[in-house]
Amino acid sequence: MPSRWMNALALVGLTSACATTQLASGRLERTEASIRAAEEVGALAVPDARLHLQLAKDQTAQARKLADDGDERAGVMLTRAQADADLAVALAREATAHNEAARATEDLKAVKARGTP
């Protein structure tokens, strides 16, 4: 009797090892949200941010394909996608802050050039 249980457990283990690798839906949703955030903060207008945004999109698609193929590397690929999406957001925000600072500096120079009344 115990050998039947062992055989059954071994069969279950083998079957689950061959099953499709699932991506954690929460992780996938967070990555997709970060990709959308990057687009919304203007990553497409910043060359470095656009590059990392595209990498994030490509890596997300690759993670899905790897998961469908049952490849355990899907999670690692999704982690890379999340990192690139987050970097795209940061680079886009940095560019916006830099542009605003440059405008403020120009405004200050213009005010100083007019002189104080």
Image (cartoon, rainbow, N blue to C red):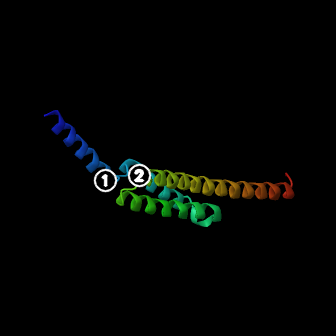
- Please tell me which residue lies in front, 28 or 5: 5
The three-letter code of the residue at mark 1 reads: Cys
User: Residue placed at 40% from the left, 60% from the top?
Assistant: 64
Task: Pinpoint residue 3: horizontal percent, then vertical percent.
Answer: 18, 36
Residue 103 visible in the picture? yes
User: Residue placed at 20% from the left, 42% from the top?
Assistant: 7
In which quadrant of the rendered image does the N terminus lie?
Answer: top left
* Marks 1 & 2, CB-CB < 8 Å contact: no
Residue 33 visible in the picture? no
Few, some or many C-alpha atoms within 10 Å of disc 2 (few <14, some 14-19, many ≥20)? some
Residue ID for mark 1: 18
Task: Pinpoint residue 65: horizontal percent, then vertical percent.
Answer: 40, 62
N-terminal of the pair, mark 1 or mark 2, is: 1
Which SS class for mark 2?
A: loop
Task: Using the numbered discs, state the Cα–Cα distance from disc 1 to disc 2 in whole angstroms.
Answer: 11 Å
Residue ID for mark 2: 72
Task: Pinpoint residue 28: horizontal percent, then vertical percent.
Answer: 41, 53
The three-letter code of the residue at mark 2 reads: Glu
Q: Is residue 22 above or below residue 2?
A: below
Q: Is residue 8 above or below residue 117?
A: above
User: Residue placed at 40% from the left, 56% from the top?
Assistant: 71
- Please tell me which residue lies in front, 74 or 87: 74
User: Residue placed at 48% from the left, 51% from the top?
Assistant: 76
Few, some or many C-alpha atoms within 10 Å of disc 1 (few <14, some 14-19, many ≥20)? few
Quarter assignment of residue 113: bottom right
Task: Pinpoint residue 46: horizontal percent, then vertical percent.
Answer: 63, 64
